[in-house]
Each structure stands twice: as structure tokens, then as C-alpha cells.
Amino acid sequence: MVRGIATKPARIGSDKIYLTKARDFLNGAIMEAEKENWNSAAVLSIHAVISACDAICAKFLQLRHGGADHVHAVELLSSLPFERSEIESKLKQARRIISLKNAAEYEDRLIKQTEAQEMLKDAQRLVEWVENKLGL
């Protein structure tokens, strides 16, 4: 387990709920990107990743992130029982997205089209990976 990360126990079957949320957020991000609403596409991509992380951790660790810093939700992936290279790839994708969370939600700047499109691409890859790992 990753030290210093606040976690909560995950109920059996909650992985499916978190994955449904991830898919919903991802679908919303796609729709917002089609309308060139880059800020909302970015925020929805971020939340898709957070929910996807909760889904896979709930399934394989029976835990999910329980703190205020969403970077830690991503860091829990490092505890998953998969090949290190696979985990490192997914950590890299998730970190790229989460690193823009403050900019997308709180800072006095707008998310650029290229940033939003990259975030969406990473979110799609991560959600698809989680779907495959969960067999859903």
C-alpha cells in the first residue's frame, strides 16, 4: 500500500458504480470537446480519471482514495497487482491529467484546446484500460 494516502474501504460491487461514473464523465468530456468547450472538457476528463482510479482500486485493493488531494487517488494505482511497466504507463497518463486540475478548476486562466484534447485522449485510454481490467 502507498504510505500517507488516506483511503476508505470499498464495498463489493462499488467498482461498477465508479466505472459508470467514469464513463459518464468521459462521455460528457467528449460532448464538451465537440462543442469546443475546452474548460469543461478538461474538468470532466479529470473526474473521469478520478472515478476510473476509484473503480480499479475498489476492485483489486478493496480501497479507494479518501482524502482531499486527488493526486493521491492516482498514486494508489501503484499498489495494484499488475506489471510495473503497465502501472507506470497508466500513472503517467493519470498524473498528466491531474496535474492540470487546479488550472482547469481554480486558476485565472483558460485551458487551451491542445491541453483539453490531450487530457481527453489520456482519460479515454485510462478508462478503457480500467474497463478491460474489470472485464466490463
Image: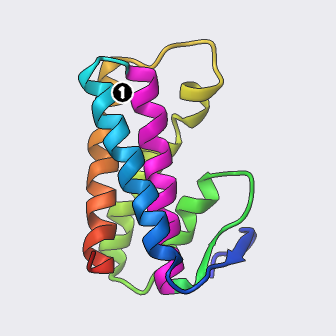
| Residue 89 inside the magenta-drawn segment | no
Q: Position of residue 96 (x, y in %)?
A: 43, 44
Give above or below for 91 relative to 40: below
The quadrant of the image that shows the C terminus is: bottom left
| Residue 40 inside the magenta-drawn segment | yes
Q: Residue at x 74, y 59 (%)?
A: 67
Magenta-drawn segment: 38-60
Q: Is residue 130 left or right of residue 76?
A: left
The image quarter containing residue 61 is: bottom right
- Residue assigned mark 1: 115
Q: Main secondary structure of the magenta part?
A: helix
Q: Position of residue 81 (x, y in %)?
A: 42, 87
Q: Is residue 14 left or right of residue 91?
A: right
The residue lying toward the viewer, choosing from 4 and 126, is: 126
Q: Residue at x 39, y 49 (%)?
A: 24
Give above or below for 39 relative to 59: above
> Could you tell me if residue 119 is visible in this image?
no
Q: Position of residue 85 (x, y in %)?
A: 31, 73
Q: What kind of residue is marked 1?
A: Glu
Image label count: 1
